[in-house]
Amino acid sequence: MNSVFISYSSKNNTEVCEITKMFDKYGISYWKAPEMISAGSNYAREIPRVITECPVFLLVISNDSQQSVWVEKEIDFAINSKKTIVPLKIEEVELNDMFKFYLNNVQTISYSEGRGEALKKLRERISELINIQPINAAEDKDRVEVEKDRLRQHRARRIMGLNPQPVSCKYCDGELELIRNGVYKCRKCGKENYDYFRTVRNYLEKAGPSSKLEIQKATGVPRASIDYFLRQEQLEIPKNSNIRLRCAKCGAPIRTGYLCDNCK
C-alpha cells in the first residue's frame, strides 16, 4: 500500500519528479498520476480509491495547480475522507479563495525558505506521519546505495518485461543464439526469432504506417510495449494520424518520446 498521494498539476511534473526521487531515496511509498494508473482503469475510478488508501495527501501548490479542476476534485475528496493534508508551496503565489478555504489553519511548507530546507522539512513531516524512523548519516549512505541498486534492478526487469527476448524457437522449440540486435537464430532449424521491438519493426517495414491497434492485432505485441517503444523514441506516430502523445512537462502534442522539442 502507498503512503502518500501526490496531488499536482502536470505542468509541475519536473518539480514533482524531484520530490518523488527524494521519496524513493528515503523509502517513502507514494502514488502519482498518470504513470501509476492501472492498465484498463481511468482517473475517475483510480484516484478516489488511492486517496482512500493513502494516509497522507501531499498537495503541491502552484499557480497551475490552483487552476486545475482535477486538483480541486482531489482536495475535496481528501477532506471528505478525513486525510492528513500536507501542503507544499513550490511557487510564491497568492492562494485563491478555494485553497484558502481548504487549507485554513493547515501548516504549509514553502520553497521560499530554500528548496533544500523545504524538501527536508517535507521528508521529516511525512516520515513522522507514517512512522518512518530517522536514520543517521552512515545508514543514509548505505540506504541510498541499496535503493539505487533496487531501482536499477526494477528498471531492468520492467524493460525486459516490455521487450522480452524469445526463450526458445517458436517453430521447433530449439535453442536460440543472438545474431544481431533483437534477432535470434535457432541452432536447430535455422529460422529467425525476434524480440517484441524487432517484431514490430518487421511488421511496419512491410505494412507501412499503422495504428497501435493494428500493430497489436497483427503481431501479438502488447499495447504497453508499443507505448514503451514510442516513449523511448524507438517508434513515432505517423504524421497524418490525429493521435498524439503529450509532453510530460508542458502537455504539448508530440509524436514520440516524453518531451517536446521546446522542453528538451
Image: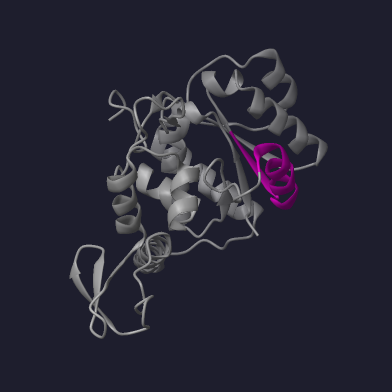
Q: Nearer the viewer, residue 255 or 257?
A: 255
Residue lying at 30% horizontally and 47% vertically, measured from the top left? 206
Quarter-of-image position of residue 61: top right
Residue lying at 40% horizontally and 62% vertically, measured from the top left? 151
Q: Is residue 135 magenta?
A: no
Residue 101 versus residue 78 in the image, above or below: above
Question: Is residue 51 in sight in this rendering?
Answer: yes
Q: Nearer the viewer, residue 134 or 259?
A: 259
Residue lying at 61% horizontally and 51% vertically, measured from the top left? 38
Residue 93: x, y in percent? 52, 16
Residue 115 versus residue 104 in the image, above or below: below
195 vs 243, left or right, is left
Quarter-of-image position of residue 157: bottom left
What range is drawn magenta here? 42-59
Q: Is residue 49 magenta?
A: yes
217 vs 42, left or right, is left
Residue lying at 69% horizontally and 45% vertically, measured from the top left? 46
Quarter of the figure that contains the N terminus = bottom right
Residue 134: x, y in percent? 52, 61
Q: Main secondary structure of the magenta part?
A: helix
Residue 55: x, y in percent? 70, 50
Quarter of the figure that contains the C terminus = top left
Residue 177 versus residue 196 in the image, above or below: below
Residue 176: x, y in percent? 27, 79
Quarter-of-image position of residue 196: bottom left
Task: Report the residue that reaches farthest toward the left.
Answer: 179
138 vs 121, left or right, is left
